Image: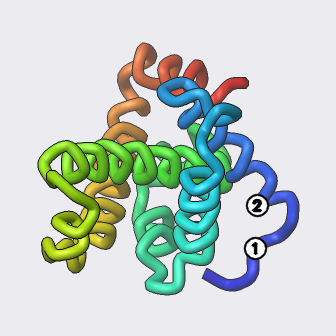
C-alpha cells in the first residue's frame, strides 16, 4: 500500500484500538505488549504485500459501501492482533521456560494468522451485506 494519509491512519488506529479494547484493556497493557501491538499495527497498515489492498478492491461494491476502507483496515488489524495474542498465550502456556519458547519453530505463524484474519474479516463484511445484526455488531465493536 502506498503511503496512507494521516486521516486514514488515525481512523484505522482508532478503530483497531476500539475493537481490541473490547477484549483487552489496552490502557493496561504492559509496555512490551503495547509496543508489539504498535509494531503489528504499523506492519499491517503498510500492507507491503498488498494483501489488504487487493482484498478490499476485490470486494463487491455492496460490501465496500458498508464502511470506509480505513475503518475496515483497523478492524482487520485488531482481529489479527487478537488472534496473535491468543496464539502467543497458548505458546507461552505450553512452554515451560522462555528458552523452550525460543527453541520452538514458529516461522510463518504471524503471516498465516494475518492471512487467516483477513479472510475472516472479509467473510464477516460480506455477510454484513444481508445480515443486519452482523452489521450492527461491526458498528458496536468499532465504536469507542
Mark 2 surroundings: few (<14), some (14-19) or many (≥20) residues within 10 A: many
Name the residue beneath numbered marker 1.
4
Looking at this view, name the residue that lies furthest to the right: 6
Name the residue beneath numbered marker 2.
9
For the point 86% across and 65% down, the residue is 6
Instruction: Look at the picture and state if 68 lies above or below 50.
Output: above
- Mark 2 vs 1, N-terminal side: 1
**Looking at the rendering, which quadrant does residue 129 occupy?**
top left
For the point 65% across and 51% down, the residue is 31
For the point 41% across and 66% down, the residue is 55
Image side of residue 99 versus residue 73, left or right: left
* Quadrant of the frame with the N terminus: bottom right
- Residue placed most toward the observer, 102 or 10: 102
Mark 1 surroundings: few (<14), some (14-19) or many (≥20) residues within 10 A: few
Image side of residue 52 versus residue 109, left or right: right
Looking at this view, name the residue that lies furthest to the top: 133
- Residue placed most toward the observer, 87 or 142: 87
- Residue placed most toward the observer, 62 or 112: 112
Pinpoint residue 112: horizontal percent, then vertical percent.
24, 67
Specify whether residue 69 is in view: no
Instruction: Look at the picture and state if 72 lies above or below 98.
Output: above
For the point 51% across and 72% down, the residue is 53
Pinpoint residue 58: horizontal percent, then vertical percent.
41, 66
Amino acid at each position: 500500500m502506498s503511503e496512507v494519509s494521516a486521516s486514514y491512519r488515525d481512523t484505522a488506529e482508532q478503530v483497531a484500538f476500539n475493537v481490541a479494547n473490547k477484549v483487552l484493556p489496552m490502557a493496561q497493557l504492559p509496555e512490551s505488549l503495547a509496543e508489539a501491538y504498535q509494531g503489528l499495527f504499523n506492519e499491517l497498515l503498510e500492507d507491503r504485500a498488498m494483501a489488504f489492498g487487493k482484498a478490499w478492491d476485490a470486494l463487491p461494491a455492496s460490501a465496500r459501501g458498508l464502511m470506509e476502507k480505513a475503518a475496515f483496515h483497523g478492524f482487520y488489524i485488531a482481529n489479527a492482533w487478537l488472534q496473535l495474542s491468543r496464539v502467543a498465550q497458548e505458546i507461552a502456556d505450553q512452554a515451560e521456560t522462555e528458552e523452550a519458547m525460543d527453541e520452538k519453530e514458529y516461522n510463518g505463524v504471524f503471516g498465516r494468522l494475518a492471512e487467516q484474519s483477513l479472510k475472516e474479516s472479509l467473510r464477516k463484511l460480506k455477510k454484513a451485506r444481508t445480515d443486519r445484526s452482523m452489521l450492527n455488531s461491526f458498528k458496536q465493536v468499532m465504536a469507542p
